[in-house]
Amino acid sequence: MGQKVNPISFRLQVHKNWSSRWFAGKKDFAKWLAEDIRIRELIEKKFASRPTISRIEIERSANLITVTIHTAKAGVVIGRGGAGVTELKANIEKIASLPVRINIEEVKRPELDAKLVAENIARQLERRINFRRATKMTAQNTMAAGARGIRIQVAGRLNNAEMARREKVIEGSVPLHTLRADIDFHAARANAPGVGIIGVKVWIYKGERS
């Protein structure tokens, strides 16, 4: 049996950090965890039509919840005259038990972000683009953007095949067992018409951390 570990959780406290940062006792833990999940689902659903959200970080203090949204297109999230953020803040405050502050941070190089890359491939597969072309072109773009290595794996009924199979593309090196290696990972789903769900996994190696 394969013993597979999420590359990000494997490197927690080495050079990665939790996406939710707070401490709670037994009384509040379940409630706050459910709040975090609902906040993330709300934000992801709002921008589901195009892959722009890279990461959502939630920090809680005694009287404030700070939600930091890392996005490839800050203008889409902020909206005209800040209307998008104001509406988002109002919707989150309906869920949250404390006042909310929203920070928007722009991702400078979306080609090096595993979530954006995986969701981009998934959207291409939903538009019936050939999986080999989609994965090969994406891998080349990521390497050209400065990555040290990328591994893309797609699984499902590829190209309308009767039987599901798994295919992968690897460019450069992806040292999954090296803790110092800065590896970003994400798994996405493509709801391809006529063939069901196709899974997309992306590992991007950005170099070693000291």
Image: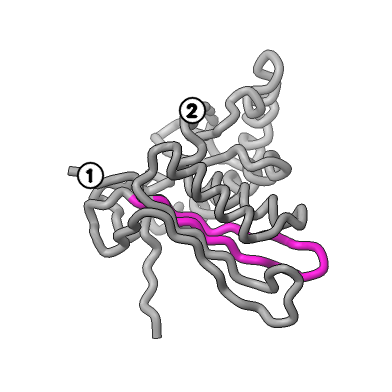
Where is residue 87 shown, x and y percent of the image? 70, 27
Mark 2 is on which residue type? Glu
Against 153, is 140 above or below? above
Q: Is 189 covered by the magenta stretch?
A: yes
Q: Earlier in the sequence, mark 1 or mark 2?
A: 2
- Residue highlighted by disc 1: 209
CA distance for labels 1 and 2: 22 Å
Residue that numbered label 2 is attached to: 105
From the image, give the main secondary structure of the stretch colored magenta. strand
Q: Residue at x 69, y 51 (%)?
A: 124
**Could you tell me if the residues under marks 1 and 2 are in contact, i.e. CB atoms within 8 Å?**
no
Q: Callout 1: 10 Å neighbours few (<14), some, many (20+)?
A: few
The dot on residue 177 is none
Report helix, strand or loop for mark 1.
Answer: loop
* Quarter of the N terminus within the rendering: bottom left
Residue drawn at x 40%, y 58% as measured from the top left: 26
- Judged from this view, the residue extending furthest toward the right is 194
Span colored in magenta: 183-204
Position of 166 with respect to 124 (left or right) is: left
Amino acid type at circle 1 is Arg
Residue 84 belongs to the span the image colors magenta:
no
Percent coordinates x, y for residue 118 in the rendering: 56, 52
